Amino acid sequence: MNFDLSDLRAFVAVADLASFRAASEALHLSQPALSRRVDKLEQALGFRLFERTTRKVELNAMGRAFLPRARHVLGELEAALLGMVDLSERIHGLVTVACIPSAVDNFVAGVVRDFHQRFPGIRVRLLDQTAADILLSVARSEADFGITYLGMREPDLEFEPLAAEPFVLACRPDHPLARKRRVRWAELAEHACVVLAPGSGNRLLMDQGLAHVAARPRWTCEVQHVPAQLSLIAAGVGVGAVPRLSLSGGAGASLVGIPLVEPALVRHVGIVRRRGRPAGAAAQAFHDALVAAHRRAAPDAPAAARAVPSGRTPRR
């Protein structure tokens, strides 16, 4: 076929950035030159890869199918060069990571800072999404990998655990429950609760874990997302069960986190990737940096059991 690696790089850049203008700037090419490379690739393949309008450009079905193959070819090339030239000087490109919002502060922010110092030629795009949307982004190759708590049972995805994160009761320091060392789920039936609406990933995990608990939390207010839940709890609307990571910032930082027991529910946060899809050199480098940073933070714990510091210690 009459195309070369520069044509593949042009295609991947446009696919990643969804813009010929942004891709031309990233590759230091003029837009006409970039368009010629993409046109050349499409002519060689015999089918179009993008749907173009005056307002946007996006992959069509053939483009979505071809994108992981193009990434694989470019990744193999980068991998072949690693033994010849120092990694930090060779790797360039874009890494797209989809992650639950609580993971940005607790897992990703520090890694991105250090990663840019080591690999200045690699840009990192973060997609802060719900757990369900992350699975879709990874499955559709819109993200190189995701950081989430769903995906362990998906046949087309691989799940690599990073931390076991318990659910805790979030309440104001002046709430009567704030003086307890632990709280049973059944006790929440006696208090006003702010809960997550059915359909969210966290609500799904809690409903499954509490299937055999007779007394369930009595909800006063229902919300869609954890940040809204924490804001209402901080305002005194009620108490609520939240993942421990969520208490590390924002409205959660002002709240007390108390272990919930009988049963103790845990969500496993980890890295989810498409099964059998080789990672490009840039994506693999960021993945390795993320895993290494987490291991340094908790060197004595196995990956699936490492926990991240929570909010305030409850009163006794």
Image: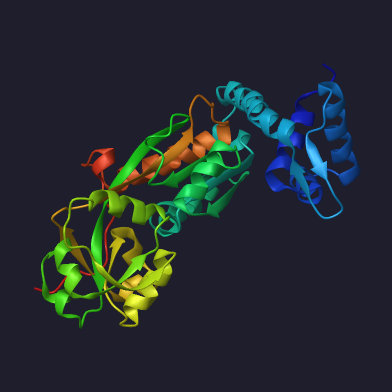
Left or right of residue 36: residue 120: left
Residue 184 in sight from this viewpoint:
no
Q: How many labels does the image show?
A: 0
Q: Position of residue 279 (x, y in %)?
A: 54, 30
- Residue at the spot 76% in from the left edge and 35% down from the top edge: 11
Q: In which quarter of the image is residue 1?
A: top right
Q: Which of 211 and 236 is in front in this view?
A: 211
Q: Which residue is drawn at 28% across and 77% down?
A: 238
| Farthest top residue in view | 1
**Residue 55 on image: x %, y %:** 82, 55
- Picture colour scheme: rainbow
Residue 294 in sight: yes
Of residues 92 and 257, which is closer to you in this image? Answer: 257
Residue occupying image coordinates x 87% and y 39%: 35
Q: Residue at (82%, 27%) from the top-left corner? A: 47
Q: In this view, does 219 lie above or below 81?
A: below
**Residue 61: x percent and y percent?**
71, 34
Q: In which quarter of the image is the C terminus?
A: bottom left
The residue furthest front is 214
Q: On the rendered structure, is 29 left or right of 92?
A: right
The image position of residue 151, as x and y in percent, is: 41, 39
